[in-house]
Image (spheres, helix red, strand yellow):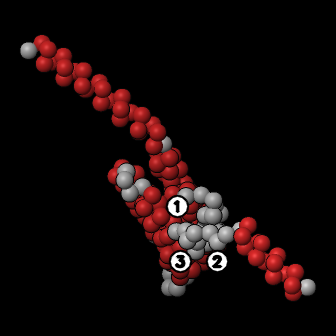
């Protein structure tokens, strides 16, 4: 049996070589299910709404337990604060991978930074206001999903931005030639 298992292991290792180190190797698959198959940018785009949802659900549980007004009194908001800190750590690797992938495109880097800023601001705003009513709170904490989606869609459309740039350059060159010809 041992003679057979060693050759099988050697053959299997030849068929399945070790994968190269990948920036998303240690990313929690719960926040980024496509980490093994997608890019760092794809992972970051998945992680933003996913992590926001997790912390929003934790805050919802605190609100159910302590009420809207009592959700932040004393240590009642500690679970949400812990969730936010945990997910800031977990999203760091996908965010850095996305920034590295976009390093040559300044607008995309700025877009990724804006998405990250929107995400952190939205997490900070999970705390209910002192006089906020339930319906207003629920509407306010669901609003970031639309903002995330718009920002992500804008970042996923590099072809539209790239196609617009060459079209605008030839339009300016003929205009400059016409001016020089008329002078």
Q: Residue at 45% of width from left, 37% of height from top? A: 160
Give the left or right position of residue 12, taking residue 164 as reference. right
Image vertical order of residue 149 relative to residue 183, above or below: below
Which quadrant of the view contains residue 54? bottom right
Residue 167 coordinates in the image, percent (x, y): 36, 28
Question: Which is more N-terminal, label 3 or label 2?
Answer: 2
| Marks 1, 3: nearer the viewer | 1
What's the CA distance linking mark 1 and mark 3? Answer: 19 Å
- Residue pushed farthest top? 182
- On the rendered structure, is 165 left or right of 151? left
- Please identify, in this view, whether the residue under mark 2 or under mark 3 is nearer the observer: 3
Q: Tell me which label, 1 or 3, sits earlier in the chain.
A: 1
Q: Quadrant of the N terminus?
A: bottom right
Q: Which mark is residue 4?
A: none
In the figure, 3 relative to 103: above or below?
below
Q: Is residue 107 left or right of residue 43?
A: left
Mark 2 lies on a secondary structure that is helix
Q: Are marks 2 and 3 in contact (CB under 8 Å)?
A: no
Taking the image as drawn, is residue 150 in sight? no
Residue 173 in the image, given as x and y percentages of width and height: 24, 25
Q: Which residue is mark 1?
A: 40
Q: How far apart are the two marked residues, 2 and 3, measured between alpha carbons?
A: 22 Å
Residue pictured at 85% horizontal, 81% vertical: 5
In-front residue for pair 159/66: 159
| Tag 2 residue | 65
- Look at mark 3 in the image and give the residue it sits on: 86
């Amino acid at each position: 049996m041992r003679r057979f298992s060693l050759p099988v292991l050697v053959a299997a290792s030849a068929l399945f070589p070790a994968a190269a180190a990948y920036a998303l190797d240690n990313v929690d698959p719960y926040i980024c299910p496509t980490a093994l198959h997608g890019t760092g940018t794809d992972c970051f785009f998945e992680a933003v709404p996913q992590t926001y949802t997790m912390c929003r659900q934790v805050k919802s549980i605190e609100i159910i337990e302590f009420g809207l007004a009592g959700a932040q009194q004393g240590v009642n908001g500690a679970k949400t604060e812990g969730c936010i800190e945990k997910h800031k750590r977990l999203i760091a690797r996908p965010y850095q991978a996305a920034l590295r992938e976009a390093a040559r495109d300044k607008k995309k880097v700025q877009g990724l930074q804006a998405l990250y800023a929107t995400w952190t601001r939205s997490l900070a705003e999970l705390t209910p206001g002192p006089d906020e009513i339930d319906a207003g709170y629920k509407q306010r904490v669901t609003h970031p999903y639309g903002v995330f989606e718009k920002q992500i869609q804008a970042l996923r459309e590099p072809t539209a931005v790239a196609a617009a740039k060459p079209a605008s350059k030839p339009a300016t060159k003929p205009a400059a030639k016409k001016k020089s010809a008329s002078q």
